[in-house]
Amino acid sequence: MAEFDLVVRNGTVVTAADVSRCDIGIKDGRIVALAERLDTSGQVLDASGRLVMPGGIDSHVHIAQDGDDGTVMADDFRSGTLSAAFGGNTTVIPFALQPKGKSLRAAVQNYHARAEGQCLTDYSFHLIISDPTEQVLGQELPALVQDGYTSFKVFMTYDDLKLNDRELLEVFDVARREKALVMVHAEGYDAIKFLTERLERAGRTDPYYHAESRPIPVEREATHRAISFAEIVDVPIMIVHVSSADAIEQIRWAQSRGLKVYAETCTQYLTLTADDLKGLNMEGAKYVCSPPPRDKESQDACWTGLQSGLFSVFSSDHCPFRFDSPAGKKKQGERTAFKWVPNGIPGVEVRLPILFSEGVGKGRISLQEFVALTSTNHARMYGLAPRKGSIAIGADADLVLWDPDRKVTITQELMHHGADYTPYEGMEVTGWPETVLLRGTVIIDKGVQTGKSGDGRFLHRSISPFAAPRGRRPTQYD
């Protein structure tokens, strides 16, 4: 009799490739056997009537991240990863943000200190480059990529984060040389600044006008510019949190030309609209994020992008702030105008249930596509495969047992994040995570926390196979 630490028995196993009935044998935190029937003298977890899928990987979350205006993010690593785990996730990739004028390496060390001993799930870090000095581009960034921080994000907007065109090109060039994957927040800074000031002069300062200050052409233009720069440098890029048909059209054009342009969309762009920002008494501030929610046509375009394979990954862009607190969204918005409202909404805990219910449950995507979009593709894109994101021999035993028939109404009372609201309040979903295993250990058991903070480990990542350039022949200037 083969000896296992745990056998997950009688479940319907779903991967990005297929659906099958089999048992899963786990030893020392890894999957060591897959068979129709596994005998063991060890522990058995009965998954009858449940789907067994790879634990979710949310590769776009913001946790314990510094704000330049004193705003306090609602989640630290303890509450952020607890919320992620209750949502069926076993790995998250938040950001280590470089403050202007500061060392990138020191920023990474700072975020490590914040996360140490706090995480219930496994985790890694993307970098955020806000100040691409010679020191950063020549020494710190290349060394960090070699140390396993193989992806980083750049911003085309926000006062304290934006890079100008020359800086973007220089950062892209380092990414090409080091084979790092660049994530791009594509919204044009100057256009947003112009529109914001015009709206303020007209007295249009309510949260709804946040969406008016960042209309679809602002995203379209920046997406086109990012793609053009990537083509010039010959570097793969990931356009994150895509929200509109116009931006999707730009990405589709690039992909049709063979450019390595990848894309991500998020829960809010499938479910929310700009009308949600119209709530009375500053309630609309709860929905302020960037890019903002759009309209029904944009929602349909995002669904089409998911169905057609244009989007490689589906993330939450979890960026939680409290609504009713001294530094929260309501008070900040009441100061002067929408521009003071912290940008971001919570969502890591409901990413999987909403996509399952609205996608699989309504026939828009298959079970296999669900797994690919929420786990497998994240692992492949960001250098975590084959250890993460799959149910295969040798992979970490990161699993979620899913009840496909459970009906749940999403409420703040159900949530485990640090925010005091959920933007998806009252939404009904069918399908819910029941039990979550991290490296073979049950951390959520039928909706009850059984793991502890500190169970999560930091993950060094390999170079992404999607980060290699197309192979443009070098010129005399390279």
Image (cartoon, rainbow, N blue to C red):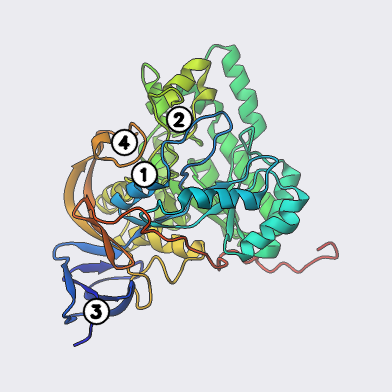
Q: CA distance from mark 3 to mark 4?
A: 41 Å
From this viewpoint, which residue is outermost toward the bottom? Answer: 1
Q: Earlier in the sequence, mark 2 or mark 3?
A: 3
| Residue 269 appears in view | yes
Category of crowding for the residue at label 1, using alpha-carbon neighbours closer than 10 angstroms: few (below 14), some (14–19), many (at least 20): many
Q: CA distance from mark 1 to mark 2?
A: 22 Å
Label 2–label 3 contact, CB within 8 A: no
Q: Circle 1 is placed at which residue position? A: 79
Q: Circle 4 is placed at which residue position? A: 424
Eye-nearest disc, 3 or 4:
3
Q: Earlier in the sequence, mark 1 or mark 4?
A: 1
Q: Circle 3 is placed at which residue position? A: 4
Eye-nearest disc, 2 or 3:
3
Near-viewer residue (431 or 366): 431
Q: Secondary structure at mark 2?
A: loop
Q: Earlier in the sequence, mark 3 or mark 4?
A: 3
Q: CA distance from mark 1 to mark 4?
A: 19 Å
The amino acid on which the numbered mark 2 sits, given as a three-letter code, is: Val
Residue 45 location (% of width, % of height): 17, 68
Among the 4 quarters of the image, the one containing residue 471: bottom right
Q: Quadrant of the C terminus?
A: bottom right
Q: CA distance from mark 2 to mark 3?
A: 48 Å
Look at 31% across and 36% down and name the residue there.
424
The amino acid on which the numbered mark 3 sits, given as a three-letter code, is: Phe
Q: What mark, if any, has residue 288 been given in the picture?
A: 2
Residue 250 location (% of width, % of height): 57, 48
Label 1–label 3 contact, CB within 8 A: no
